Image: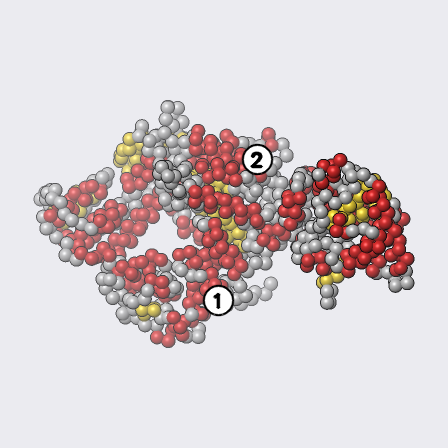
Amino acid sequence: MNNMAQTLQEKLAILSDAARYDASCASSGTTRRDSRDGKGLGSTEGSGICHAYAPDGRCISLLKILMTNFCIYDCAYCVNRVSSNVPRARFNVDEVVSLTLEFYRRNYIEGLFLSSGVIRNPDDTMSDMVRIAKRLRTVENFRGYIHLKTIPDASPEIIAEAGLYADRLSINVELPTDRSVQAFAPEKNPATIRAAMGNVRGLRTASKDRSHTGKRPPIFAPAGQSTQMIVGADGATDATILTRSTSLYGDYKLRRVYYSAFSPIPDSTAKLPLIKPPMMREHRLYQADWLMRFYGFGVDEITSVAHQGNLDLEIDPKLAWALQNRHLFPLDVNKASRDMLLRVPGFGTKTVNRILTTRRHRTLRYDDLLRLGASLKKAQAFVTALDWTPGSLTDSVNLRARFAPPPEQLTLF
Amino acid sequence: MFTVPLTRIGTWEAWRDAARALLAARVPPEQIVWDWDGTASELFATDIPPPTTRQAIKVPADFVEMAQWVVWHKDPQRFARLYALLWRLRLEKGIMADRADADLARLRQMEKAVHRCKHKMRAFVRFRDLRTGGARRSFAAWFEPTHHSVEPCAPFFARRFADMDWMIVTPDVTAKFTNGDLTFHEGREKPDLPEDAAEALWGTYFQNIFNPARLKISAMTSEMPKKYWKNLPEAQFIPGLIANAEARVREMAAAAPTLEPARVARIREQLQAVPQPASWNLLNAGLSACTRCPLHGPATQVVPGHGPHDAPLMIVGEQPGDQEDLAGTPFVGPAGQLFDQLAARAGLDRGQAYVTNAVKHFKFKEGAKRRMHVNPNTSEVSHCKFWLDSERTLLKPRLTLALGATAMGALTGNAKGVTARRGTIEQTPHGPVLITLHPSALLRMPPADRPAAEDAFVADLMLAAETLAQSTPSVDAAARSA
């Protein structure tokens, strides 16, 4: 454990390896900034940029590292827990600052996503992280994106300072139920985590109020806050998870809830079995999340068609809902309301907007729908157009079989 | 026939001005040959100069926005297609809103392709440090875009990298940013750029942020197509990462759990060593959130101590029972009721004592009809001792009555030999402790033995009452009651 001997290269290897289990890499949705004045470095322009993709299919947008992977907590699912024998390292402020700036200048990244294990105590750890963000902003005039993970139990004053330098703050709820958090992360307190999210929400709201003189308080974490839930480590069903996300979006105005399929970690604990990460389940949860946020679906509508609280892994949740609600279909694309068009499998929000503007000019045909970007393989059973009617297809018994992957023969060994 | 020359650099302005003039002169699309950078076939070339009027014409704003991107597409037909739509727009005003129009759909597709190319260029340009040593740092990159996207992309780099000089060289056009000025030059061959040490660090990062358990190659190649790989320093690691992924996951699964490092015990101790609560409110708040031992899980609630906070006598039992667990108050079940009867015989008023338990959660196993009491183990007692010690510190009782072996152990540090030690008073750092049996032990006795045992118990309680009467109130207690 002789850390003096570690090179920057070795530290980076350890501390990025330790950071890979955080799903978030978003760098979008913050204020617009640039450095055209020539006095600083960096810009943010609404949408983020994915600078590279790893073979796991995940985008690399930010330099996602831990300040240190030393940690005094013993969360069973975490690679950095105190009882694990993974190699440990710690960056100093200069190292993080120079890595961020040098990577940024070469156009490798959009900014920094800094997380950390808890060392000494939550306040000290969070203060060290804030020091790095402050240095980047105030000394180096860095105008790129900064995402800081907040440490549970860090005091509100330190979080308030973090929000002045960071675009986004996040704190992970880790597991969908309080009981699982207590079982797998004994030092973490679900109530404190919720209190911290509530605090950030309050600070964000306050930062938008003008005073009586019309002066605005400093901008606080303009890209909002997000959180992450591990899927598949405990017994929680998709219904539990989605209900939890709904309350997180509602109660704390989160920008995003990330679902992270529980993935094998080096030197794992005997408490959690090493499984193949449930990636399809993760994918279906994201689809359901999207339906709730952009397609007007209620959590109960999605979970009402789930089997024992879990989403259908073979077909997407919108299709699953439509198959159970066939009495509402087929819809006439030339007359149906926006709300209903959004519920057609194979129609995205863009397609629906295009249908609405285009049908003012013409009565839509099957081929028109293709040009508008609809996926008709799915949609054709659920819509009618000028020259198209699905006939008995909508109510046919084997409609589901057209979309579900063919049953696989079990292999012998 | 008109031949309209268009330059490689400044294509958009050239096309816009020409289209404007041609439209004003009512030149139909089929009479125009667009000659971009001298690439038009000479078959139809003419020497007639195209009209150059600068008369203003009205065009929908979304057409202009779309055309600004389409002109950078590599399709040689792009200018003709744009002009053809422009020609139609004179008479059919609504086309731009009609996404199903075939001509518009084709142009929108081209626009999308250029947008994607722009996006990939913003993402995949990799600068190298030229180490020129000037006042401004200097960087350069080699890039091969799919479409002609250097010119529309360069302002983005100018906004982002304004405090350094940079150059993006492509076979198509070269963009140079020097001292805040952006200029465009002819495309070039791939230059020899100096090695950059940062690329090794970037490669390290790329390899380690990859999670081998989540291999999903198609998701990567759909967003980072292979045609870009040759100019991405990190791409050289991709084949190796893919090849070894499965073995790394298998290795993780096969590795036996290791023993935890030596520092864990010390860190755990530190975490547990939180300061004792300084007030009854803090004590109760902490107690209700306590998860120090697993007993909080199945129990209904924590059962805190009960009684005046200036009581001279503290009575400590073992743990809450079934009824206490439901009520949230100690000593309300059968044992508590028996205790009250016997205490009355001894002249001891339980209402004047602070009553609590060595363990604050009910430990039980599910029986056929009711929950069966289970003795707390040493670990549970020692976890809960934190709270018992806090209560003793806050209360400062003149006498503490230990009911049974568990309470005796928690109060004196020694849980052995309760029958021999009962009826005696032992000194502890928190004051004297009088030891007796637990009333539930009396309840479990054969009926014949019970009267004698009850008498002995009452005798112990009378000793307690006597001791209290003799001991003068401590200065603290006097100050508190004053």
Q: Are marks 2 and 1 in contact (CB under 8 Å)?
A: no
State whether residue B164 is above or below residue A228. above
Question: In terms of secondary structure, where does tag 2 sit?
Answer: helix
Judged by depth in the image, the label closer to the viewer, 2 or 1, is 2
Chain at tag 1: A
Residue at position x 40%, y 35% in the image: A143
The amino acid sitting under disc 2 is Asp
Helix, strand or loop for disc 1: loop
Question: Disc 2 designates what residue?
Answer: A124
Instruction: Name the amino acid type tagged 1.
Output: Val
Judged left or right of residue A393, residue B276 is right
Q: Tell me if A135 is positioned left or right of A79 in this view.
A: left
Q: Does residue A334 appear anywhere in the picture?
A: yes
Q: Which mark is residue A305?
A: 1
How packed is label 2: few (under 14 Cα within 10 Å), some, or many (20 or more)?
A: some
Which image quadrant is residue A90 in? Answer: top right
Asked if labels 2 and 1 share a chain, the reply is yes
Q: Is residue A254 left or right of residue B68?
A: right
The picture places residue A130, in percent across and down from the top left corner, at 50, 35
Q: What residue appears at the point 34 percent right and 72 percent down from the top-left corner?
A: A390
Specify the subunit that label 2 lies on. A
Question: Residue B97's x, y, as percent?
Answer: 24, 57
Whether residue A329 sits left or right of residue A235 in the image: it is left
From the image, which quarter does the C terminus of chain B lie in?
top right
The residue at 13%/45% (across/down) is B56
